[in-house]
Amino acid sequence: MHTRAALLAEIGDRIARHARPDMTTSIDGVLLSKVATDGSTPDYTLTEPLLVVMAQGGKRLLLGDRTYEYRAGHCLLVAATVPVTGHYVDTSAASPSLGFGLALRPAEIAALMLRAPGERRRRTEHPESAITTGDADVDLLDAVARMLRLLDRPDDAAVLAPLIEREILWRVLTGPLGPTLRQIGSADGNLAHVSRTISWLRNNYAQPVRIDDLASMAGMSSSAYHRHFRGVTAMTPLQFQKCIRLQHARSLLLARPGDVAGIGHTVGYDSPSQFNREYRRLFGVPPGRDAERLRDQPSRAVALV
């Protein structure tokens, strides 16, 4: 058995060699991130369900009023689509942040849950946060290292990658982060019900919304829905919708920098002054000035989260 330090060194080396600007690899669902930045400029990201194992560097994430930090040897588990703000730490051009990501598929997790011991199969009734962090133990790191070795052995990857993916999920499922991972595989769990409304908000962010309608979509009372939604996302449904609107507006500004009022209307704002005010509150500068700043910035590597 390799030591934890040796496994982290190997994982970091393989990520550095194989990472692409778009994070994709030849193995479906496996993502690699190599980012060299001083951390002064935050990332604004709409996450997807994902497991991240950090081999080098680190990142601080803000979700609503919650802060999460993960560094080399830590793992991050994202259980739902949520808007986050990220700042890299312990990262530079000479020592970039190196991260391994595995896209989380509910069907794979649900199948493994049937094999888990009864105590570990139990579904929590309390609202779990969409994000949690913890230490990556030797067994998990060993499985990640073996997955990365397959990038140099494509003939083996077709057969072995799905098996190692299941092993990685099993290590997480039966470890301290298991309760959060189980939520993804539970079709009738509170996270699944909340995620249904998250998906609706993501696809219909420009439309007016009523909390009672979202609660009905989730199959909950309005008070229970509000409690569970906030437990998962650290914000209210309307705050969540606002974050998604503003993140979409920011992406549109790159293509249409001179059409601030039009972009505000596109993402659901009838009042240009309200759009400017809320955009500045989230991103620190008005949309017109932010468009200039984004245009002048050199392109940055895509980050896992």
Image (cartoon, grey):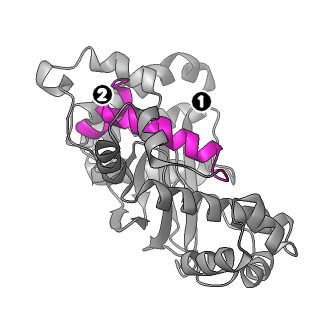
Residue hosting label 1: 28
Q: Which quadrant of the view contains residue 146?
A: top left
Residue located 68% across and 67% down the image: 300
- Relative image position of residue 78 (x, y in whole percent): 41, 46
**Depicted 33 relative to depicted 228: above or below:** below
- Give the side of residue 303 with respect to residue 120, left or right: right
Give the residue at x 21% y 37%: 175
Picture residue at 35% right of the left edge, 68% below the top: 65
Q: Residue 170 carries which label?
A: 2
- Residue 299 is at least partly visible in this image: yes
Q: Where is residue 138 in the image (x, y as percent from the top left)?
A: 25, 42
Asked if the stretch drawn in magenta spans residue 14, the answer is no
The answer to which of 51 and 55 lies nearer the viewer is 51
Judge the density around disc 1: few (<14), some (14-19), many (≥20) Cα neighbours within 10 Å: few
In the depicted structure, whether residue 277 falls above or below residue 4: below
Count residues near mark 2 (Cα–Cα under 10 Å), then give few for <14, some for 14-19, many for 20+: some
Disc 2 on helix, strand or loop?
Answer: helix
